[in-house]
Amino acid sequence: MIDFRKITYFLKTAEKLNFTEAARELFISPQALTQQIAQLERELGTPLFARTTRRVALTEAGQFCYQKFAPVLDSYLLAEQEVTRQLSHQSSLLRAGFFHGLPKQKIVNPWLDLIQTYFPQAELEILSTDLGSIWRYMDEGRLDLCLTNVDDSFPLQGYHAVRLLTAPAEILVSQSHPWARKNAITCPDMAAADMVQLRTSYSSGKEENFYGHVRCRSVRQVADFDTLLATLENGRTFAVCPPTFEYHDRSGYRFFPLPEEYRFSFSTVCAARHHPVFDLEELLTGLKAHYQ
């Protein structure tokens, strides 16, 4: 196999038709260039240049080699530029995803501000998505860090993670629901009612959790949090969630504590994967101090 460096030397010499000028641009001595060209000619078994005391010209074989080798060098240089550009882009890219139901002003925007404060040189790519997708994207390496809600049983092993905020899960209904006029909700109340729940393909890894053992008449699953809120508006279903979501303070909702035997908490967490450039553990420490 021919050393690609020799091809580079040959092409530069063929362009200049002057060994001294070619050597200067290649940052080697004319003697070294002459030796490299001579070795290439021996490997190919034919002269590539016709040299006299006055001029240098390509032989017929040299012209053929130039026609074949020049496009290869152009492709190599283009590929080198694209690889360098892409790897440089990837190294500075920081992909952050958040659960779209979180309050933007209170929780999400400060989180994004702190990321940019810690890593001003990062090219920040932001994704708003649902609960199930956010962990799938983390597992698949499509996100570097995320901000979302998890229940007490959710496993955070495998990630660097901090719990930023914790709030009790509460029953949520619209003002048009019959429970809106009650003072408290009991287990029998829940057993006779319909619950709406976010659909997620991501399991917490534990069979025993609130959604696994609560008694209710039926469970209706919806794809995203906006649909959950819209479903509550008809006054026929209830939901269980933390009181930390966008629009939670709207007058159209009532919150009730869960019955004692069903009580659990949600946490807003930031979880991060290893990043080759940015120290995300340092960021997590700063986030924890900010939110607490």
Image: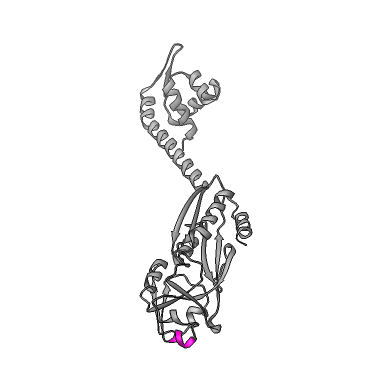
Q: Position of residue 167 (x, y in %)?
A: 56, 71
Question: Vertical placement of 51 versus 101: above or below?
Answer: above
Looking at this rendering, what residue extends furthest in the top direction? 54
Q: Position of residue 227 (x, y in %)?
A: 38, 68
Quarter location, residue 237? bottom left
Is residue 228 visible in the rendered image? The answer is yes
Residue occupying image coordinates x 45% and y 31%: 7
- Magenta stretch: includes residue 189: yes
Question: Vertical placement of 184 versus 102: above or below?
Answer: below
**Side (left or right) of 161 relative to 87:** right
Q: Residue 180 versus residue 212: which sits nearer the camera? A: 180
Q: Which residues, given as a range, are shown in magenta?
A: 187-191
Question: Vertical placement of 77 versus 97: above or below?
Answer: above
- Magenta stretch: includes residue 53: no
Is residue 277 visible in the rendered image? The answer is no
Q: Residue 91 versus residue 120: which sits nearer the camera? A: 120
Q: Main secondary structure of the magenta part?
A: helix
Q: Position of residue 93 (x, y in %)?
A: 50, 49
Q: Quadrant of the C terminus?
A: bottom right
Residue occupying image coordinates x 44% and y 81%: 181
Question: Vertical placement of 27 versus 189: above or below?
Answer: above
Looking at this rendering, what residue extends furthest in the bottom direction? 188
Residue occupying image coordinates x 49% and y 32%: 5
Q: Position of residue 4 (x, y in %)?
A: 47, 35
Quarter location, residue 174? bottom left
The mark total stands at 0
**Render colour scheme:** one colour
Q: Residue 92 versus residue 8: which sits nearer the camera? A: 92
